[in-house]
Image (cartoon, rainbow, N blue to C red):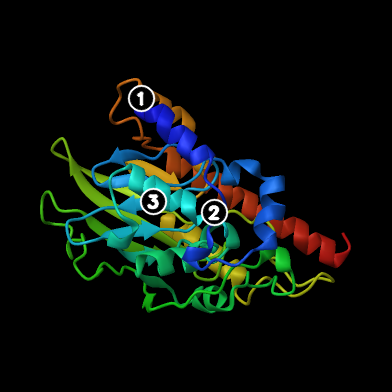
Amino acid sequence: MRNIILILTLALATPLATPLGAQENKSAVDWTERQPHWAAPFEPFNIIGNLYYVGTEGLAVYLITGPEGHVLIDGGLPGYEQMIIDNIAALGFDIKDVKYLLNTHAHFDHSGGLAALKEASGAELWASEGDAPALEGGVYAGFEDKPEYAAPPVKVDRVLNDRDSDFGGAMISLTDDEPGKPFLLTTLTPGHSRGCTSFRLFIDDEREHLDILIFCSATVAANRLVASDEGPAQYDGIVDDYRLTFEKTKDWTPDIFLANHPEVFDLKDARERQLAGNRRAFLNRGAFQKYIVAKRNAFEEALAEQTDAVNGE
């Protein structure tokens, strides 16, 4: 009965109400017509330890809880923040106990809700130096002239650097050698955006130290890798950044690989296994290596295609 009530509540959730300070954003309407699952409700749940899923069917948002405050990673589409807030509440937590907002990258489908979530929670937004200008400008770097890629501007309170692990003690151990304490580590993985940021969460579960990766992205997607008639490269140094990330991640072997698009790690199948009684259903060792090798190959193919197109080949 509780699940039925929750599903009905989420299904009736409307785009963000005025008290959260959101403005109507046409891009959200356009993109949910193209990608309806991005705004489709999904029942929130505990992944493992103090890590929770509070996003929609098509856009992941993660809550990491702690006794002194919580951390929220990503904000989904603009206009659908209330779903995230309701999901947090359904799990027994309060949006006002979120002390830190983090962002994988400054693209509207992952950063669009940050401004309203920041207002609702009073939390600080910490983001990479590479993506801070895009977040504060409400733009998608390289597509500043495309309103459909815009997001509500949001102030960045602190810049996240590579291998940052100091989150004010909200719930994070500052070293990963204290058994039983969670440890969150940022790692910059640029390319998909200039400041693309991934997060490693280390927790103890059943006397096992688990390495959980929330990966930003390594897809080319709509990015221009080289200058062409359509415009300059998405940003200066983008090719080198992708290659840096592929080199940096080549030996990563997380126990649990998560991402900001749920289909990347087969969220629905894993959740079904969990509901069937497998409490460690999200363990997917080896999945990240398959992913990153495939993305590296896809990147090189896209680079060759874009280069050939510019050269008229």
Q: CA distance from mark 2 to mark 1?
A: 26 Å
Q: Quadrant of the C terminus?
A: bottom right
Mark nearer the N terminus (2 vs 1): 2
| Above-or-below relation of 89 to 281 | below
Q: CA distance from mark 1 to mark 3?
A: 19 Å
Which type of secondary structure does the marked residue at label 3 adopt?
Answer: strand
Please state the horizontal and vertical placement of residue 155, each as a whole percent of the image: 46, 78
Please state the horizontal and vertical placement of residue 167, each as a whole percent of the image: 26, 68
Tell me if residue 265 can be seen: no
Q: Which residue is at the front of the view, 143 or 213? A: 143
- As drawn, the residue found furthest toward the left would be 179
At label 2, which amino acid type do we have? Tyr
Q: Which residue is mark 3?
A: 62
At label 3, which amino acid type do we have? Tyr
Please state the horizontal and vertical placement of residue 279, each as a whole percent of the image: 28, 29
Which type of secondary structure does the marked residue at label 1 adopt?
Answer: helix
Q: CA distance from mark 3 to mark 2?
A: 15 Å
- Nearer the observer: mark 2 or 1; the answer is 2
Determine the residue positioned at 46% across, 59% down: 247
Q: Which residue is mark 1?
A: 275
Does residue 94 appear left or right of residue 84 in this picture? left
Residue 271 lies in what quarter of the image? top left
Q: Which residue is mark 2?
A: 80
Crowding near the residue tagged with mark 1, few <14, some 14–19, many ≥20 C-alpha atoms within 10 Å: few
Determine the residue positioned at 85% across, 71% down: 229
